[in-house]
Image (cartoon, coloured by chain):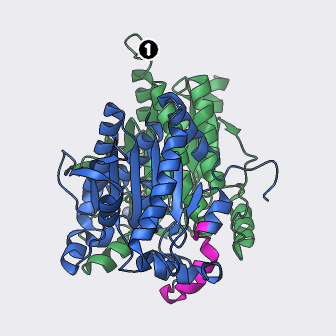
Amino acid sequence: MEETLTAAQRVALARQAQRPGICAFIDGLFTGFFEMKGDRLAGEDGAILGGVALYHGQPVTVIGTRKGRTVEENLHCRFGMPGPEGYRKALRLMKQAEKFGRPVITFIDTPGAYPGIAAEERGQGEAIACCLMEMSTLTVPVVSVVTGEGNSGGALALGVANRVLMLENAVYAILSPEGFASILWKDASRHEEACELMKLTAPDLMQLGVIDAIIQEPEGGAQRDAAAQIAMIDRALSAELHALRGMSGRELAAQRMEKFRRMGAPRPEADA
Amino acid sequence: MTHVFEKRRNRLRAMKELSESYLPPEQVITCPSCGQEVAREEVERALSVCPACGHHFPISGPARLRLVMDGAKYRELYRHVQAGNPLDFPGYDDKLRAAQEKTGLDEAVIVATGEIGGRRCVACVLDSRFMMGSMSAAVGEKLTLGIEYTVRRALPLIIFSASGGARMQEGILSLMQMAKTSAALAKLSQKGLLYISVLTDPTMGGVTASFASLGDVILAEPGALIGFAGPRVIEQTIGQSLPEGFQRAEFLMEHGFIDAIVPRSGLRDALAKLLMLHEGGTAWRKH
Ligand SMILES: [Zn+2]
């Protein structure tokens, strides 16, 4: 059935409120999670959740965007739209992971970075830019999973990984289809048309070389069976981490940089 | 004697190029900032700056390079890298061709090498006449090639930003250029090389959230609009209008994100001074 879904239908699925989020993944995949708050500069941002946990007995740093499960939580997390404090916290935790030699696992599900006055005052752009630059140099394994919608630099800021995985019905794009339509055609109502043109589905992104693997979803979508979904993520994650185990820190950084270096570069062998 | 003459001629030619495509064609221009009517010629002579209020009109990429480079001379690199249509986006090929015809450029960025104050450097300039200076895969590729060239030759790098942000028609591949350019700058930084980022009007979106914010030194032109989210998007999200001066260069400096605001007339000297000050600091370098 999934084969026949349109891009717009996948966008709707990716935004499903019942779809499992960062909290479900932490509960289902890790043990002993210890949350670490704050950017040590200005504040704490609920839209990003991070800390240390055990993954199959191995300490890892887990970071993800959080949308919240109740209206109260939604508001507290600004529906998963981080501000600069969130990105600076994420970067702090990544550097901490590097210090202690732990792999970094990130979960991405965000409408984008928060567009607000305070966010701009505190350097939203600078915070994201630093994540991109520093993340590219990390000498520990980094695996990212796009689990819902991954929009804009606000998603990419957690996605400069050795391996980028994506759930079957997740979407990953330059911005929301509504924003895309409103910028390009001054008409947000043409968002379904935008979905088809944007190449934002997992199969499209696989073909473009933007992601490395697709994780299957249970019949009907992740929200139908969170436990089954978590088991599927677990299989993919442990395989990826296992594959990265043999690489030195220097090789990990080099592989990551080289991967992103190739993106959008003119390919002499012509597009397949 | 001939040297002085040549310098003056180059300067005059530079001034002509400065105004080529940005200023309205009329002999008298109404300044968008102060509303005063000013003679076009006078604005041109002031490097496309309003003589009444100091409003900085945008200038083209070639004009920017002529303005800062010694003798207005530079050599262009990687000109051959051109945008494709990676998503087969309808109408994009025509848009690209129109932009190329309008500007005489192949893409929205020029990569060049030349000397400023007698010191060789690599300069990349985004040109907002070309599809709002937006970041295509080709723009990201040219910037990255420019950064890599800088690293190989151990030169200082200057990037002049002027961009509305992402190139919508290239979708996710435009987004990925943020990671690509930032990773390239990480390598430059690891080599202990200098990167000066100059923010001009406008510097927005993915450009702000990548290379433009990663300079060792960040300069801006007066009044330049600089930010991540567009003002309209913010207004729609928060449901209120934005304060006066929001996201302008002065606002960013006040909040700690810019080292200095440099008027166009002082830009070349400021860059020359920074290049001079960063020379010879190798003795205590880590790498
Ligand atoms: Zn004026």
- Quick one: B109 or B238, which is closer to the camera? B238
Q: Where A112 sits versus A145, above or below? A: below
Q: Where A261 sits versus B69, above or below? A: below
Q: Mark 1 points at which residue?
A: B280
- Quick one: A241 or A47, which is closer to the camera? A241
Per the image, is A262 magenta?
no
Q: Is residue B150 visible?
A: yes
- The residue under label 1 is which amino acid type? Gly
Q: Where A37 sits versus B100, above or below? A: above
Rendered residue at 37%/75% (across/down)? B232
Residue A22 occupies quadrant: bottom left
In the rendered image of the structure, the colour used to display chain B is: green
- Quick one: B169 or A147, which is closer to the camera? A147
Give the overall secondary structure of the magenta segment: helix
Rendered residue at 63%/55% (across/down)? B137
Q: Is residue B66 visible?
A: no
Q: Residue furthest bottom?
A: A189
Quadrant placement of the N terminus of chain B: top right
Coordinates of residue A129 in the picture (x, y in percent): 41, 49
Coordinates of residue B160 in the picture (x, y in percent): 50, 46
Chain appearing in blue on the rendered image? A
Rendered residue at 49%/78% (across/down)? A221
Ligand 1 falls in quadrant: bottom left
Locate residue B167 relative to residue A111 in the image: left or right. right
Q: Mark 1 lies on which chain?
A: B
Which region of the structure is painted magenta? A187-202
Coordinates of residue B159 in the picture (x, y in percent): 51, 42
Locate residue A23 relative to residue A202 in the image: left or right. left
Quadrant placement of the C terminus of chain B: top left
Per the image, is A190 magenta?
yes
